[in-house]
Structure formats: structure tokens, C-alpha cells
Amino acid sequence: SPTLLNSTNGGDAVSFVVPPSDSSGTLCTLTRVDNPITNTHIPIARSYDVKDWQRNPGKYVSYTTIECGAVSSGDGDDEYLCQLSLPALTGENAGYYITRYYSEPLPSRTLAARFLDRTTWGPTYEEIIEFESRIETNGTRAY
């Protein structure tokens, strides 16, 4: 579920220091909720697969800056963090939120169906089951 970073209105800008996504297969999104009634999330930035935060394209992020780098903790261990500077919230904004999504391995049947759907005119159920067993036996070499 989304984590609220800031819901304070006013001022010139807000700034957050956050790490990039923490593992491969993880997606982190930064959004602004403009209307608390409809709960509409406007994408601002994202980080995925342990990559730096990136601004999303669009008019909502024209005043957003992102700087990433190692920060010394004083005990010899550096921590890699990103500073996100964002426009201040206005009266109609509900807040900035970070949401983390974790991927789970897809079942063999789903992988088989996706592959056959993309490479044929559409697989039959029997073809999916047969290809699923090849994936379970050979992994992705079955492709």
C-alpha cells in the first residue's frame, strides 16, 4: 500500500531523501494525489531493479529534480540515496506517496500462454499444457 511522504500544503518546495528500489524485480513509484475523493495518483518518478530514481515524463514533473549518490554515514559505510525535490503541494493536493511493488515468479502455465500468444495466432489449451511441461523441465531454454 502507498506510504504517505508529505501532506503539508504551502511553501516553495519539498525534498525527500530515499533509496532506490532495493532489489531486482522491485518497482517503486512516487505519485502525487491531486484529489483525495477520487484518489487519483499522478506519476512523478520511479525506481526499479536497483536503478536510480527517474522522472516520469509529463507536465506534472517539470519542477522535479533528482540527485543520487553515495552518502557517508560517518562510520565508514556509504549509503546510496537519492534526493527528490518536488513542488510544494497546493490546496487541492492530498500528498506525495511512495508505493513499492514486488514481483513474484510467474507460474509455468502463464509463461507458456504468454509465449504462445505472442508467437502464434493464439494457442489452444492443449498447446499451453504441453509447452508448460517443457518449461518445467527445461526452464526458459524451452523457448
Image (cartoon, grey):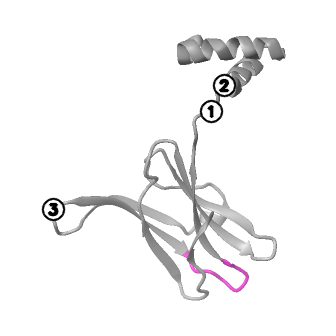
Above or below: residue 140 compared with residue 75: above
What is the x, y in percent for residue 22? 43, 52
What is the x, y in percent for residue 15? 46, 75
Give the amino acid type for the residue marked by disc 1 in the picture: Leu
- Mark sitting on residue 76: 3
- Kindly report the secondary structure that dominates the magenta region of the rendered protein: loop
Report if the CB atoms under discs 1 and 2 are less than 8 Å apart.
yes
Between the residue at mark 1 and the residue at mark 3, the CA separation in whole angstroms equals: 40 Å
Q: Give the class, few, some or many, for how many residues have Cα within 10 Å of label 1's Cα (few <14, many ≥20).
A: few
- Mark sitting on residue 106: 1
Q: Give the class, few, some or many, for how many residues have Cα within 10 Å of label 2's Cα (few <14, many ≥20).
A: some
Depth-wise, is mark 1 or mark 3 nearer the camera?
1
Above or below: residue 9 compared with residue 84: below
- The residue that appears at 65% across and 69% down in the rendered structure is 32
**Of 4 and 60, which appears nearest the observer?**
4
Q: Which residues are magenta?
A: 87-94
The N terminus - image quarter? bottom right
Depth-wise, is mark 3 or mark 2 nearer the camera?
2
Q: Indicate which disc, 1 or 2, sits on the residue closer to the N terminus.
A: 1
What is the x, y in percent for residue 42? 69, 64
* Residue receiving disc 2: 111
Between the residue at mark 3 and the residue at mark 2, the CA separation in whole angstroms equals: 45 Å
Give the amino acid type for the residue marked by disc 2 in the picture: Leu
Q: Indicate which disc, 3 or 2, sits on the residue closer to the N terminus.
A: 3
**Of 143 and 139, which appears nearest the observer?**
139
